[in-house]
Image (cartoon, grey):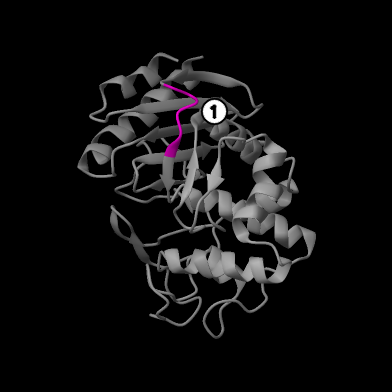
Amino acid sequence: MQSLRMIENWPVPTAAAAVVRADGSVAGTCGPQQHRFPLASVTKPLAAYAALVAIEEGAVELDEPAGPEGSTVRHLLAHTSGLAFDEQRTMAAPGTRRIYSNAGFETLGDHIAEATDIPFPQYLREAVLEPLGMDATELAGSPAKDGVSTVADLIRFAAELQAPRLLAPETVAAATSVVFPGLTGVLPGYGHQKPNDWGLGFEIRDGKSPHWTGASSSARTFGHFGQSGTFLWVDPEAGGTGAACVALTDRAFGPWAVDVWPPLTDAVLAELHAA
């Protein structure tokens, strides 16, 4: 895809990207597909997917207690447990505010590890990474932010999100729909959003403004971006049948990303539409 070549002009040392259609075919790639990048918070969708596997396996339940008193696995996945951004401190009653929380995902990882008697990085590998053939991906610490991967591997994950094999389609549909609708909160890097809609580990585009996706992204778009200059989105309406885009870099998120990410997404969507 010609649109992906826009990353060649990004002010970053290294960048790689790909677009994956809903049928799993790769529409285009650019940059070193096997280069391993720190994912930062793009780790969270992978961790969430492992949590959903644990739920389907019966190891944990969405509405069982986890985290602060009154909080559940569902609250932790949806950033509504009340935990602070990066510390084990309760800032709100569960279900009342959307507080984006690394601590919540770390609590979730610990909860699943205790329930399964398997360290969470190992559980993620066995439940998600190995079945999808994501051999270059690993979790080297926090399930909130310490993943490392390649575009080639995330192509496989993007295909799975659009045509699930590891989970029931209904589970993925629920995880990528709004959970606890109407809650306000801060989207890191983009300020206060009303509402600040999320699913179970996936941010939902809806009508958020400003946003890291494109002006032409559908409201149904879901995904995540990371502070290491990374993102993955899935737009079920892209090109009429749906598509996903992955972009990884090795420069920390900042004004440069705010400037170049939306134009790339809009160019990709326009090229898919015209195809």
The tally of labels here is 1
**Residue 176 placement (x, y as % from top left):** 58, 51
Instruction: Name the residue that disc number 1 marks.
Output: 152
Location of residue 202 with respect to 32 vertically, above or below = below
Q: Looking at the rendering, in which quadrant would you find the N terminus?
A: top left
* Residue closest to the eye, 125 or 144: 125
Most extreme residue toward the right is 57
Q: Is residue 115 left or right of residue 40?
A: right
Badge 1 element: helix
Instruction: Tell me which residue sits at (36%, 66%) in the image.
Output: 185
Q: Residues within 10 Å of mark 1 (few under 14, many from 20)?
A: many
Q: Is residue 192 left or right of residue 1?
A: left
Q: Is residue 100 left or right of residue 43?
A: left
**Residue 34 part of the magenta-drawn span:** yes
Instruction: Tell me which residue sits at (33%, 46%) in the image.
Output: 211
What is the span of residues highlighted in magenta in the rendered image?
32-37
Instruction: Tell me which residue sits at (24%, 44%) in the image.
Output: 254
Q: Name the residue type under label 1.
A: Ala
Q: Judge whether residue 160 can be spotted in this image.
A: yes
Task: Quadrant for residue 213, please give it.
Answer: top left
Location of residue 112 with respect to 41 vertically, above or below = below
Q: Is residue 77 left or right of residue 24?
A: left
**Residue 145 placement (x, y as % from top left):** 44, 54
Q: Main secondary structure of the magenta part?
A: loop
